[in-house]
């Protein structure tokens, strides 16, 4: 199943780790079952949220295989294969296709910065051609890659030079640029939004899908936002979106990934801690995170069953 354009809420899945810090493959299926029950429409595996860059290539392949198997075709699985070595990224793309993934996505290299559109086209063209049968989405996340890229220019040229280029995961906050990406001359691209706390603004400017970390913990809230937009009920949509803003504000008081994994564990998805260089929360921080979330009413409106908290 290869469903593009992508639709709805796509959870950027975390990579569960055990007490020793090894990848906990057995925790993937229960996590995915829980996410699908909460209403997510797709999974984005080994991205920033999944700490893909901190895993070995062998671990990335195991996570992809376990995720595809656990999903069993219920929703599209998008695999993030970005790597500083284009050869490794290409081999991960080929592996993802053979493992049964539906879509391949990649960041650009980030140690040496990508300087211009042509360099980016060359990098992405090579990776996309390693899985030519699958749609390819460039993962635009300049805050983490540090590359100053004209993303609209990339799409205009990529339309002719990368046959399977289907779109972008746009993780930036420039709504006008996001809209320009949706209105390219070369071809119509599927431009997927990547900043959860601005989902309402993105959908107002034409988004139909979003990939993000907090869809792991509050998909039902975001579904209500999308329903309110569809019903032209902007007052309700704004109120619900503000819950997301408040949630992200509380999470950002702590190491963000550690906080996300701690919340998932509270919600009945035991996913362990993070890989270095990311930090886990201390027990005191977990307690104060839970208190902070309670104060904003998170456990009432996130939409996950309260009794699942441990
Ligand atoms: O790409 C995520 N961005 C990063 C998606 O990891 C930098 C988002 O889902 C954010 O975690 C979220 C909270 O700021 O919007």
Image (spheres, rainbow, N blue to C red):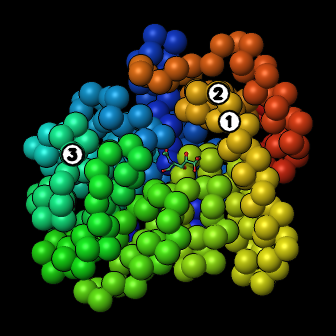
Quarter of the figure that contains the C terminus: top right
SS for tag 3?
loop
Relative side of 148 to 283, left or right: left
The reply to whether dot 1 and dot 2 touch (C-beta < 8 Å) is yes
Which disc is residue 251 wearing? 1
Residue at (58%, 70%) from the top-left corner? 202
Respond yes or no on whether mark 2 lies under 8 Å from ligand 1. Answer: no
Task: Report which residue position mark 3 lands on.
Answer: 113
Q: Distance between the residues labelled 1 and 2?
A: 6 Å
Q: For mark 3, does the 10 Å Cα neighbourhood hold few (<14), some (14 to 19), or many (20 or more) residues?
A: some
Q: What's the residue at 21%, 45% (across, down)?
A: 113
Q: Is mark 1 within 8 Å of ligand 1?
A: yes
Residue at mark 2: 254
Q: Give the image location of residue 153, x and y in percent.
A: 26, 74
Q: Which of marks 3 and 1 is in front?
A: 3
Q: x, y percentage for residue 66?
A: 39, 39
Q: Which residue is drawn at 82% across and 43% down?
A: 298
Q: Is residue 26 visible?
A: no
Residue 97, how many percent across, how many down?
A: 24, 55
User: Residue 28 or 239: which is nearer the viewer?
Assistant: 239
Real-space CA distance between mark 3 and mark 1, rounded to the nearest whole angstrom:
30 Å
Please identify the quarter of the rendering in which residue 259 is found. Answer: top right
Q: In this view, does 209 lie above or below 105?
A: below
Describe the element under mark 1 as helix, strand or loop.
helix
């Amino acid at each position: 199943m290869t469903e593009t354009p992508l639709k709805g809420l796509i959870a950027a899945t975390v990579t569960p780790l055990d007490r020793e810090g090894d990848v906990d493959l057995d925790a993937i299926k229960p996590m995915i079952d829980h996410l699908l029950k909460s209403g997510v429409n797709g999974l984005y595996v080994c991205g920033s949220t999944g700490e893909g860059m901190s895993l070995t290539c062998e671990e990335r392949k195991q996570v992809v295989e376990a995720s595809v198997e656990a999903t069993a075709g219920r929703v599209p699985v998008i695999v993030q294969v970005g790597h500083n070595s284009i050869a490794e990224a290409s081999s991960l793309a080929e592996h993802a296709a053979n493992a049964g993934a539906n879509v391949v996505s990649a960041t650009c290299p980030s140690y040496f910065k990508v300087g211009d559109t042509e360099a980016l086209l060359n990098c992405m063209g090579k990776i996309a051609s390693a899985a030519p049968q699958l749609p390819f989405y460039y993962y635009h996340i300049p805050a983490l890659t540090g590359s100053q890229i004209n993303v609209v220019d990339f799409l205009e040229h990529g339309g002719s030079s990368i046959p399977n280029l289907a779109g972008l995961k746009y993780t930036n906050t420039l709504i006008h640029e996001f809209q320009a990406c949706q209105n390219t001359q070369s071809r119509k691209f599927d431009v997927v939004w990547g900043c959860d706390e601005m989902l309402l603004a993105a959908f107002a400017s034409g988004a139909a899908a979003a990939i993000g970390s907090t869809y792991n913990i509050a998909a039902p809230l975001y579904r209500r936002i999308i329903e309110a937009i569809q019903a032209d009920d902007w007052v309700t949509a704004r109120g619900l979106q503000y819950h997301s803003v408040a949630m992200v504000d509380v999470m950002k008081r702590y190491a963000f990934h550690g906080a996300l994994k701690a919340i998932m564990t509270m919600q009945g998805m035991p996913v362990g801690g993070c890989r270095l260089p990311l930090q886990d929360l201390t027990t005191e921080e977990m307690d104060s995170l839970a208190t902070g979330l309670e104060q904003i009413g998170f456990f009432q409106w996130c939409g996950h069953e309260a009794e699942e908290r441990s």
